[in-house]
Image (tube, rainbow, N blue to C red):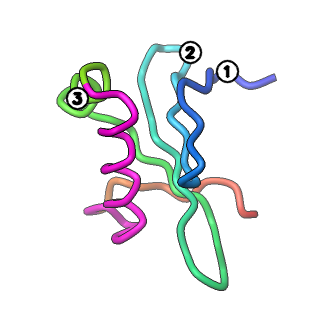
Amino acid sequence: MSDEEVVLQSPLLYRVLRGRDGALSIEVLVGGIVQFEVRVLLNDEETASFAKEGRSFADRMAQAIMADPPFDGRSVRSSVL
């Protein structure tokens, strides 16, 4: 059983998760021929933006991560698909 709650599951191949400690992260499927998931922990500003804008903010953030999977060194690789 996971310690995380899925807050938002998107057909754009990402999901927003809430950890046991309440912190939000976004997990995004990236790549072309070889696909993998990366996860980025939302900072305070991003968490506030998600609370205010919801899916539209998450869509923009997921698209930014898809365009640059290292996401300025903030992403970590999740499970391999």
Q: Residues within 10 Å of mark 3 (few under 14, many from 20)?
A: some
Q: Which mark is residue 3?
A: 1
- Dot 3 falls on a residue whose secondary structure is helix
Task: Find disc 2 in the rendering and name its residue.
Answer: 20
Classify residue 76 as left or right of residue 3: left
Q: In this view, does 5 lie to the left or right of 76?
A: right
Q: Distance between the residues labelled 1 and 2?
A: 6 Å
In the rendered structure, does residue 28 fall within the stretch colored magenta? no
Q: Is 22 above or below relative to 13?
A: above
Q: In this view, does 5 lie to the left or right of 40?
A: right
Please name the amino acid that badge 3 sits on.
Answer: Ser
Disc assigned to residue 74: none
Residue kind at label 2, given as amino acid type: Arg
- Give the main secondary structure, helix, strand or loop, of the magenta stretch: helix
Q: What stretch is highlighted in magenta?
A: 53-72
Q: Position of residue 66 (x, y in %)?
A: 42, 66
Identify residue for label 3.
49
| Image position of 39 with respect to 33: above or below | above
